[in-house]
Image: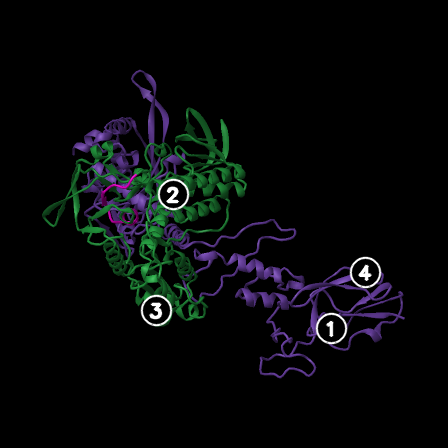
């Protein structure tokens, strides 16, 4: 006659256990003592051994189901034997333990101190959370609803709670705690890929990344921007920089190519005011009287654009000193927000990273941005035949809603002329 | 060229601890030290000064035990013997560091090193004409005493009349009259030792308070206690010139001078960033200190700077923690450097220990706080061991969260209590929760519990 194998009573106070994974399937031969399935209480995981020899005839509860202790879980016998009398009468889902708090009296015979705290297993959906996972979540103070389940039938098991707790260590407080906003809800976590998935790590956007993301998208979607690419002969600026480097004692040794370009831009914009402007309300061009240059700086936190106020009033050295100071503050994360606004035109230099041509994105409500590219060697027809010269790439993006192509190109032409005669520009 | 995963420049606390953690994390590490392993801390700073101060404390206790029923005759302090012991302690600890480096498998190169540049293969460091390559660099070159451009200082130093902490710790005898320029931690500790050991000490300080950013009330108490022991303070005085045996200063328009047999220059320390070739890789420095972020990264990827060289908090224990954060970042492990609960201690008698914000710094940051201040005489043990003396415990509690922002102590054992205060601040636990802690009785540490309940 077929025999039932029951869910073991794992402890005096254990009411039910959850089946982890079946190791055998219906039709398999089983012997006494062979492991049939794993099961979990709120304290530990166990293995259930068969209490009969024969063939596993029928499984009454599947992976992940909660089964009251001493209830028949499966039938073992000879193929063909009747198992209907062994099937448990109760419904497939295990009855939930009584809900309630400490107010309910302890049942007779049980030491009140041993009774585990009553648990609410009325989960809203899916296969829920295992008692062990719930216990761990309480101890670690995380919300099990935010855990990514990897247990059978989508159940959240203890390991998932561990993973969730680790992933919440994103703060800079002790042990990775977040002390910034008290009573902030735990952020949902993404577990690294398990099983057969390719592994990855999710990094939530920092505040700075989110704001750059929004600004860039807005700029492109709300404007009519396009880019012109020019280049100028960099001979004069390179020679001038060499002179500056040689005059270290005058404090000009650190003047860079970008400083010189920014100087030239500031001076050239005075002659081309429509590019030193903001587009306001979709119908007005605000022409600024001074040039306040935004300078794009790459920092460990992301792109930061401090403003060099009154760039057109500064000497080359003053501009260079200001630029260096702002870049340093931006990189060390100690820049005042006042210095991150108020720009009328922006310069973004990617020359040192090997960029030859690019399409910088305008910083609204400005109407233009100049991308400074690297210096490449080009050739041209000279009086004595083909000659090589250093060419500095300049990419100007402008908003066609506010400025037309010809005036934009004229600005860059003038800028190129000024750069090609840099020492003369300094005289003006 | 020998290749490493990490090259550490400097074998002081930040450097050698970084090397230890890095090798434990699997990084093949080389450490360059041009002078002595252990850096200033082990050789010319923390350790030697504490050795001297302990001898002074024993001498002081022996001389003044009468109130406690203890008298002793022919009590003497033999400075040469004190210094000899100091050398022994230093030697032991330095060889301890050397042994540790060897055990960890760190390649230690005792030579002056400089960065030569960066190639596709990594950073190039040169020492004694040999080149070394590494994927990562940790700059841990520490700091040096500031030597001000005051007339006569340079000549005084050449003549041995003016010394810094390095030379004064090697003196074989006590100067009869010692003038200390700079009333910060180093100046006060040396003033404390030499005055107990028998010198007539005068401390000249430019500001109108001693002990730097220490809480004002505590600095006043410290000054009073040190004056009781015979140290003379001249505050608000700016040194204008040195011409042995005189130190000249000006104070609010008036001039003054003090005569000395030796002058200790302790006006501060500045990071060592020049002559290291840092500019060849474009390391950004500000006011002579390497600029670093919360992970001790510099502006150059894969280059870090920990310890005094970044000027953030020039204490050995900050260097230790910064070294660990930097190495954790290299190894891809979560970590972050916080400076809001770094304790600082002045090992004078009485000891001063503080952690977190002072009333002044909290005010400057616009933090809403309430200060709780109680006398150390609320601690039974303090009363037992400090006949007739007083001390102070001050807590700063943030309004709203009720968590601790700062803790300041003056009184014996303060140095050993302050770590607990640091933990209270880091935990962000409110006063209500901290009150649930059980303190041992009788201890001086109970003063913190008293203060928590006085809030």
Q: Which residue is mark 2?
A: B41
Query: Which numbered disc, 2 or 4, marks the residue closer to the eye?
Result: 2
Mark 1: give few (<14), some (14-19) or many (20+) Cα within 10 Å: some
Q: CA distance from mark 2 to mark 1?
A: 65 Å
Parent chain of label 3: B
User: Residue at point 52% right, 39% down?
Assistant: B27
User: Residue at point 43% right, 49% down?
Assistant: B321
- Colour chain B is painted in: green
Is the Cβ of the residue at disc 4 closer than 8 Å to that at disc 1? no
Q: Earlier in the sequence, mark 2 or mark 3?
A: 2
Q: CA distance from mark 2 to mark 4?
A: 65 Å
Q: Residue furthest left?
A: B254
Q: Nearer the viewer, residue A102 or B301?
A: A102
Question: On residue B378, which mark appears?
Answer: 3
Q: Which residue is mark 4?
A: A34
Q: Is residue B190 covered in magenta?
A: yes
Q: Is residue A301 covered in magenta?
A: no
Q: Are discs 2 and 3 located on one and the same chain? A: yes
Is the Cβ of the residue at disc 2 closer than 8 Å to that at disc 4? no
Mark 4: give few (<14), some (14-19) or many (20+) Cα within 10 Å: some
Q: Which residue is mark 1?
A: A69
Q: Which chain is purple?
A: A
Q: Quadrant of residue A297?
A: top left
Q: Position of residue A171 (x, y in %)?
A: 45, 57
Parent chain of label 4: A
Q: Magenta segment, which residues?
A: B173-193
Q: CA distance from mark 1 to mark 3?
A: 60 Å
Residue B455 appears in the picture as rendered: no
């Amino acid at each position: 006659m077929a025999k039932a194998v029951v869910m073991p009573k794992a402890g005096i106070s254990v009411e039910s256990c959850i089946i982890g994974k079946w190791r055998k399937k219906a039709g398999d031969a089983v012997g006494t003592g062979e492991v049939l399935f794993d099961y979990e209480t709120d304290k530990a995981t166990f293995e259930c051994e068969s209490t009969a020899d024969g063939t596993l005839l029928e499984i009454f509860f599947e992976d992940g189901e909660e089964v009251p202790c001493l209830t028949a879980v499966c039938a073992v016998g000879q193929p063909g034997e009747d198992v209907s009398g062994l099937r448990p009468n109760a419904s497939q889902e295990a009855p939930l333990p009584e809900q309630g708090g400490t107010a309910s009296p302890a049942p007779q015979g049980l030491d009140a101190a041993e009774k585990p705290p009553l648990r609410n297993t009325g989960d809203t959906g899916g296969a829920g959370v295992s008692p062990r996972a719930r216990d761990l979540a309480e101890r670690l103070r995380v919300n099990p609803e935010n855990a990514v389940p990897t247990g059978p039938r989508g159940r959240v098991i203890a390991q998932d709670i561990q993973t969730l707790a680790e992933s919440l260590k994103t703060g800079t407080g002790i042990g990775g705690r977040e002390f910034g906003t008290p009573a902030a809800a735990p952020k949902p976590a993404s577990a690294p890929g398990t099983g057969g998935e390719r592994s990855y790590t999710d990094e939530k956007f920092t505040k700075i990344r989110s704001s750059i993301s929004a600004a860039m998208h807005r700029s492109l979607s709300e404007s009519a921007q396009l880019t012109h690419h020019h280049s100028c002969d960099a001979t004069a600026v390179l020679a001038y920089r060499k002179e500056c480097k040689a005059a270290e004692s005058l404090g000009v040794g650190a003047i860079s190519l970008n400083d010189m370009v920014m100087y030239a831009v500031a001076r050239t914009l005075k002659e081309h005011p429509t590019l030193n402007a903001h587009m306001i309300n979709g119908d007005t061009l605000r022409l600024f009287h001074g040039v306040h240059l935004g300078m794009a700086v790459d920092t460990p936190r992301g792109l930061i654009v401090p403003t060099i106020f009154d760039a057109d009033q500064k000497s080359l050295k003053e501009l260079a000193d200001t630029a260096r100071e702002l870049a340093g503050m931006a990189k060390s994360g100690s820049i005042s927000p006042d210095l991150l606004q108020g720009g009328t035109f922006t310069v973004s230099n990617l020359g040192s990273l090997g960029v030859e041509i690019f399409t910088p994105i305008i910083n609204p409500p400005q109407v233009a941005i100049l991308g400074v590219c690297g210096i490449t060697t080009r050739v041209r027809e000279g009086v004595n035949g083909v000659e090589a010269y250093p060419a500095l790439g300049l990419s100007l993006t402008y908003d066609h809603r506010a400025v037309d192509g010809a005036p934009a190109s004229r600005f860059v032409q003038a800028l190129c002329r000024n750069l090609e005669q840099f020492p003369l520009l300094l005289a003006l | 060229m020998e290749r490493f995963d990490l090259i550490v420049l400097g074998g002081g606390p930040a450097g050698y601890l970084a090397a230890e953690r890095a090798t434990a994390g699997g990084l093949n590490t080389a450490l360059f030290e041009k002078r002595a392993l252990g850096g200033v801390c082990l050789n010319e700073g923390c350790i030697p000064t504490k050795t001297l101060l302990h001898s002074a404390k024993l001498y002081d206790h022996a001389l003044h035990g009468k109130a406690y029923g203890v008298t002793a005759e022919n009590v003497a302090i033999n400075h040469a013997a004190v210094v000899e012991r100091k050398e022994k302690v230093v030697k032991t600890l330095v060889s301890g560091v050397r042994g540790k480096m060897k055990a960890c498998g760190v390649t230690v190169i005792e030579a002056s090193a400089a960065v030569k540049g960066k190639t596709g293969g990594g950073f190039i460091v040169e020492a004694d004409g040999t080149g070394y390559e590494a994927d990562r660099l940790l700059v841990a070159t520490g700091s040096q005493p500031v030597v001000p451009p005051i007339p006569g200082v340079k000549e005084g130093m050449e003549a041995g009349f003016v010394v810094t902490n390095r030379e004064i710790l090697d003196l074989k005898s006590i100067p009869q009259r010692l003038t200390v320029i700079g009333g910060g931690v180093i100046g006060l500790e040396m003033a404390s030792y030499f005055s107990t050991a028998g010198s007539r000490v005068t401390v000249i300080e430019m500001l109108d308070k001693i002990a730097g950013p220490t809480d004002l009330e505590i600095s006043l108490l410290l000054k009073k206690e040190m004056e009781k022991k015979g140290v003379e303070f001249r505050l608000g005085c700016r040194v204008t010139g040195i011409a042995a045996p005189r130190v000249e200063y000006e104070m609010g328009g008036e001039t003054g001078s003090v005569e000395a047999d030796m002058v200790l220059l302790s006006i501060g320390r500045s990071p060592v960033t020049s002559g290291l070739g840092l500019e060849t890789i474009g390391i950004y420095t500000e006011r002579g200190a390497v600029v670093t972020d919360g992970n001790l990264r510099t502006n150059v990827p894969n280059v870090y700077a920990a310890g005094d060289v970044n000027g953030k908090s020039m204490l050995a224990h900050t260097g230790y923690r910064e070294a660990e954060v930097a190495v954790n970042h290299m190894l891809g492990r979560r970590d972050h450097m916080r400076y809001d609960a770094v304790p600082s201690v002045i090992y004078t008698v009485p000891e001063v220990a503080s952690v977190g914000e002072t009333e002044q710094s909290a005010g400057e940051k616009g933090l809403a706080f309430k200060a709780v201040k109680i006398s150390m005489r609320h601690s039974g043990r303090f009363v037992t061991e400090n006949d007739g003396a007083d001390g102070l415990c001050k807590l700063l509690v943030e309004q709203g969260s009720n968590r601790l922002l700062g803790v300041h102590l003056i009184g014996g054992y303060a140095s050993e209590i302050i770590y607990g205060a640091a933990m209270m601040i880091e935990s962000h636990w409110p006063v209500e929760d901290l009150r649930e802690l059980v303190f041992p009785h009788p201890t001086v540490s109970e003063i913190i519990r008293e203060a928590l309940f006085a809030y």
